[in-house]
Image (tube, helix red, strand yellow):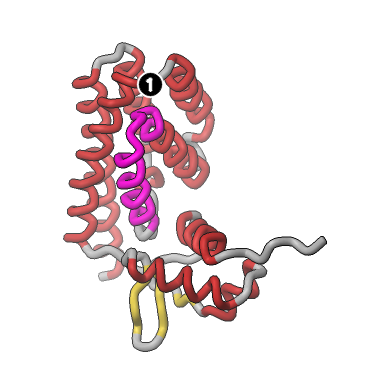
Amino acid sequence: MSSQRPSSTDAYSLILEAIDIGTYRPGDRLVESELAERFGVSRTPVREALQRLETQSLLARDGRSLIVASLDHNQMSELYVVRSELEGLAASLAARHATPEEVRILREMVEEDNALIADPVALSRANRRFHKQIHLASHNRYLVQQLDLVHRTMALMATTSLAAVGRGQIAQSEHDAIVTAIEAKDEARAAKALREHISIAFMTRLKQDATARMDEN
């Protein structure tokens, strides 16, 4: 029995995940034939996936080549503004609509993720999972779709703010405050806690970028 040939959607998901986990970083060139071989798919779905990623501005043209896009300072600032507002709305709606089971899952995530504070890469993956759970707990499919796009674009940042010294522990404390507000069904406090969490993450990233520029000079 032959297996079904991977589709362009499969290829898209595979390439997107590779960017998300840092296999391909901003500035890396993506070659159609190499991707097809890596993921075991034909070149046609890879080509279609690359076109889709370029349309979403996750890839950029460098001459005739496609490279993983990078965000300049203004783009990063714009992204964090949008993320802050959408994430705050998600937290507010989660405080209103989350089921008891969803709230318990969020609490368990915070407790389990405390063990990852010393591992920024693992904590970053757990952080994405935590935020996604809040998005789903909002019970608003259109908001979830927009936040998926925002978080895909976040993958274009070469480093995680959780790599900054002390940031992991502080971020976990912020996650705890967000869940506490959702548990209390306090919509305003949940939104405020999540917006403050995003604001601090943005400031941390700005400091990281400033330090990187100094190191380059």
Query: Does dot 1 land on a helix, a strand or a loop?
Result: loop
* 165 sits left or right of 93 in the view: right
> Which residue is depicted at the point 28% across and 50% down?
205
The image quarter containing residue 51 is bottom left
* 2 sits left or right of 58 in the view: right
The image quarter containing residue 137 is top left
| In the rendered image, the vertical position of residue 20 relative to residue 60, given as above or below | above
> Which residue is depicted at the point 45% across and 43% down?
124
> Which residue is depicted at the point 29% across and 14% down?
185
- Residue in the foreground of this view, choosing between 20 and 139: 139
* Circle 1 residues within 10 Å: few <14, some 14–19, many ≥20: many
Most extreme residue toward the right is 1
Is residue 132 one of those drawn in magenta? no
Across and down, in percent, residue 135 comes to: 36, 35
> Which residue is depicted at the point 39% across and 88% down?
64
- Residue in the foreground of this view, choosing between 41 and 15: 41
| In the rendered image, the vertical position of residue 99 relative to residue 5, given as above or below | above
Across and down, in percent, residue 3 comes to: 74, 61
| In the rendered image, the vertical position of residue 197 relative to residue 14, given as above or below | above
Q: Which residue is mark 1?
A: 98
- Residue in the foreground of this view, choosing between 200 and 1: 1
Most extreme residue toward the front is 1
**Magenta stretch bounds:** 134-155
Across and down, in percent, residue 141 comes to: 35, 38
Q: Quadrant of the N terminus?
A: bottom right
The answer to whether one can see residue 23 in this image is no
